[in-house]
Image (cartoon, coloured by chain):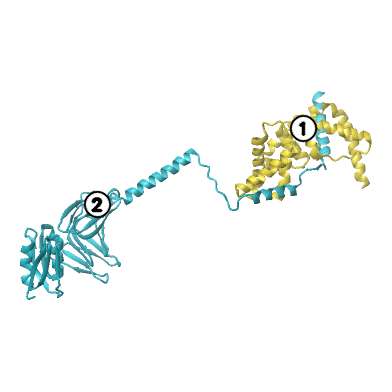
Amino acid sequence: MFNSHFEDLRRYVLYRSGNEEVATDIAQETFMVIWEKQITIDPKKVKGLLFKIAGDLFITQYRKQQLAFNFFQTFQPNNNSSTPEDEINFEELKKAYDTALQSMPDKQRIVFLMSRVDEMKYKEIADHLGLSAKAIEKRMTQALDHLRIHLKDKISGLILFFIGWSLNRTNIINNK
Amino acid sequence: MKPDKEHIDLIAVDNQSKTFFKGGEFHWKKSEVDVWANIEARIDAQPKGRILLFHFTQTKWAVAASIIAILTLVSFLRFYSVNIETIAGQHLVAELPDHSKVNLNAQSSLTYHPYWWKISRMVKLQGEGYFEVEKGRKFTVFSTKGSTQVLGTTFNILARNEIYNVTCITGSVKVKSSLGFETILKPNSKAEIQDNGEIKVETDIETFPEISWKKNIFLFTAAPVLQVFSEIERQYGVTIKTNITHSALYTGNFTKDQNIEEILEYVCPALGLKYSRLSVGEYLITKENE
């Protein structure tokens, strides 16, 4: 159970807190709770239960603390920049995402990152969080809207950069 | 148009974020293996065996306390018993909680559970007693050799040493031996549990001799002489020493109005015996020609 769920769980807490130490700690604590209470788990419900316990632990232990949001310290986006200019653009974009994600409500951020980083479908996210796919879709829309507003300055550049970057990628893929 | 602009931007953000986050990598300071090692160490550090922690809230304590209190009360009501005993030379009428009456002959004892009476009418008897049972639920008399069950009747039980006799006066009673034999007695019949546990029944008997003791009349019909003497000892609270061993039978009667010496005077010659007084309440009986 540990091997198949630990990383999922740790990423979830990271998305929620943006803090690696907290994520590792809560994920570990969750498995300790399962062991100490000798909870017998229905295999179908194991994900939901783990996420629920982790969420509760997070709330009781960290809710009132101001946590340092360092998502990109742990998560390294794929950087294909080949020129120094691309490099600068990439770093700027990362910074913009960092600020935007930090100000995004937890609920939206969790859904957004599960969808983008883990590339999970709405239904899968819903199963993990014990919510409906409809609710996930709604949060996702809110998250994108939040990004749209916070990345405003970057958007025009973004589109350009995005196009350039995509081309770059295509080239790399083609070269392979 | 602004909404269109927003929409385009949204799509741009959607697409861009997909690309941006795709294929990224996590760099954890602590690997999964490290964390697992940590968990294992903590599990090992805990005491072996499962610890059951009962987090008792006030309500749970209250419930536990009430259950214990109720159990204590119930077992008190169940097992609290009253014992009535008669010594040699004493007769007594005991009244049970439902007004059933028991006449106890000398040197007998009766035990019952007064607070459990409503639930089961059960008494223990050693010795001899004449029962007048009120109608009601099953009434059971237990003795070492057997038990007697009735609904509401009058009957006499003699349960002394190796003897167990039940005489039914009215109604009907069920007699069980401790070895599992049983019989139902109708009025004017008598059951006797024998040494092998079987029950011998005599019907259409004269019941008066069986219960005459109640009226202080003692009747003996072909009774072994030693049994007669031990009955005299019991009824007068005296000690009779004797060296006779033969099993002569005695037929006769005496009443308790007579004094002990009158009775001995009356019984002994009939059997070719004589008595002498050793001290107060102590008599020696020997053969006449000794």
Q: Is residue A108 above or below residue B49?
A: above
Image x and y of residue B130, in percent: 18, 58
Chain for mark 1?
A
Task: Name the tint of chain A in the rendering.
Answer: yellow
Q: Name the residue under label 1.
A: A101
Position above or below: B1 against B21: above
Residue B72: which disc?
Answer: none
Left or right: residue A7 versus residue B151 is: right
Q: Position of residue B2 (x, y in %)?
A: 81, 23
Q: Disc 2 marks which residue?
A: B136
Q: Which residue lies furthest to the front in this view?
A: B279
- The residue that appears at 57% across and 49% down in the rendered structure is B51
Residue in the picture at 70% in, 37% down:
A136
- The foreground one among A4 and B43 is B43
How packed mark 2 is, by other alpha carbons closer than 10 Å (few <14, some 14-19, many 20 or more), is few
Label 1 Cα neighbours within 10 Å, binned few <14 / some 14-19 / many ≥20: many
**Which of these two is toward me, B120 or A136?**
B120
In percent of width and height, residue B280 lies at 11, 60
Q: What residue type is labelled 2?
A: Gly
Question: Is residue A145 visible in this depiction of the protein?
Answer: no
What type is the residue that disc 1 sits on?
A: Leu
Chain represented in cyan:
B
Q: In which quarter of the image is residue A154?
A: top right
Q: Is residue B119 left or right of residue A164?
A: left
Q: Are labels 1 and 2 assigned to the same chain? A: no
Please say whether residue B274 is visible from this viewpoint.
yes
| Residue A12 occupies quadrant | top right
Q: Which secondary structure lies at badge 2? A: loop
Residue B91 is situated, as x and y percent measured from the top left of the image, at 15, 55
